[in-house]
Every structure is written in structure tokens, then in C-alpha cells.
């Protein structure tokens, strides 16, 4: 239980009302806009990277919603919650109601792998970072994936450059 109490969300999970748990299951229990996710997004943004948030990627007639999407580079980033996605360090199954939670968490993990397969087989790169990862490290991992991909390099001067070009052309 100690591991669950240390969970970043600060909540001890319990079975939710059925309608809520159904919709949570459909989302793959992904919580949006968590602190680690916001931290990574703002850092990447400050570095000049531009990406989509809450963007539905259509792969093989399914819609996948990674946490951060670089559409041109076809890079999908997921910030996985330690509890929901069973991180090796913090993802323990609660003793109470384990008959409910264990299969649920196992389904999450197999859904994650399924999503990975869907995306990679459609030419996407998938990056998964644990929510416990320091934001600097998570950023580095994303940057490393973006390296060599021209479409996704930071382009803070893109607009001023095109304006200069326009002026030079006398328009
Ligand atoms: Zn963790």
C-alpha cells in the first residue's frame, strides 16, 4: 500500500461507478494533463518544439491519442502513470480488491503494447516515458528521437525568416 500512497496523484484508487470505469477503460485509464506531462510539454515548447496535444492518430481504423504528437515526424509520446501502467518501480497491485485491479492493470499494459504495435506498424515512432522520470531526462529522450528528423527540429525563427525573405523579394 505504501507504493500506492506514494503515487504522484496522491490518490488511493478504488473501483469507480460503472459508467466512469467504462469510460476510463476506453481511455486506457489515461489521465490527461498530469503534472509530469505538463512539465514535459512546457519544456519542449520552451525549446522551440511544436507539437499537438490531444491529437487523435488514426491507425488501422482506430484512433489513438498519445499525450504529445509530432505529426510531421510521426512521433508519438506517452507519459505513462506509474500506477496505471505498472511501472517496475512503483506499479504495485493493491492488496484490497486485487481481483478487480490486477486484471484491469494487466489489460492496461497489454493495451499499451497493442497501441505501440499499431503505431509502429503504421510508420510511427513511439516514446514512452514514466511519470517518475525527471523532466530533463524525459525531454532528452524525446529530443533524441527527434534528432535527425528535419520536420520536427525546433524552428523558432521560421516566421521571422519568411518575413525577411518576403521583404528581400520586395513584396
Ligand atoms: Zn514509476
Image (cartoon, rainbow, N blue to C red):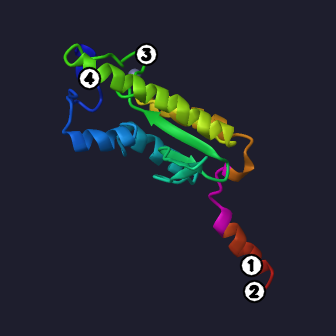
Element at badge 3? Answer: loop
Q: Residue at x 30, y 16 (%)?
A: 93
| Gap in angstroms between the C-alphas marked 3 and 4 | 20 Å
- State left or right for residue 142 relative to residue 84: right
The chief SS type of the magenta part is loop
| Gap in angstroms between the C-alphas marked 3 and 1 | 54 Å
Whole-percent x, y for residue 161 in the image: 71, 67
Does the rendering let one see residue 54? yes
Q: Which residues are magenta?
A: 152-159
Residue 166 is labelled as: 1
Q: Quadrant of the N terminus?
A: top left
The residue lying furthest to the right in this view is 169
Q: Under 8 Å from ligand 1: the CB of mark 4? A: no
| Gap in angstroms between the C-alphas marked 4 and 1 | 62 Å
The residue lying furthest to the bottom in this view is 171
Residue 171 is labelled as: 2
* Residue identifier under label 3: 88
Amino acid at each position: 500500500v505504501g507504493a500506492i500512497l506514494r503515487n504522484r496523484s496522491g490518490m488511493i484508487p478504488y473501483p469507480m461507478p460503472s459508467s466512469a470505469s467504462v469510460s476510463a477503460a476506453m481511455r486506457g485509464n489515461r489521465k490527461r494533463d498530469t503534472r509530469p506531462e505538463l512539465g514535459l510539454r512546457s519544456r519542449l515548447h520552451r525549446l522551440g518544439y511544436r507539437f499537438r496535444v490531444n491529437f487523435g492518430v488514426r491507425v488501422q481504423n482506430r484512433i489513438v491519442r498519445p499525450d504529445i504528437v509530432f505529426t510531421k515526424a510521426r512521433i508519438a509520446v506517452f507519459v505513462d502513470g506509474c500506477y496505471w501502467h505498472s511501472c517496475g518501480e512503483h506499479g504495485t497491485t493493491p492488496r484490497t480488491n486485487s481481483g478487480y485491479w490486477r486484471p484491469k492493470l494487466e489489460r492496461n499494459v497489454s493495451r499499451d503494447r497493442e497501441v505501440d504495435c499499431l503505431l509502429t506498424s503504421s510508420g510511427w515512432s513511439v516514446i514512452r516515458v514514466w511519470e517518475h522520470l525527471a523532466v530533463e531526462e524525459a525531454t532528452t529522450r524525446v529530443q533524441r528521437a527527434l534528432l535527425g528528423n528535419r520536420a520536427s527540429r525546433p524552428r523558432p525563427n521560421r516566421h521571422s525568416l519568411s518575413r525577411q525573405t518576403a521583404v528581400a523579394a520586395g513584396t
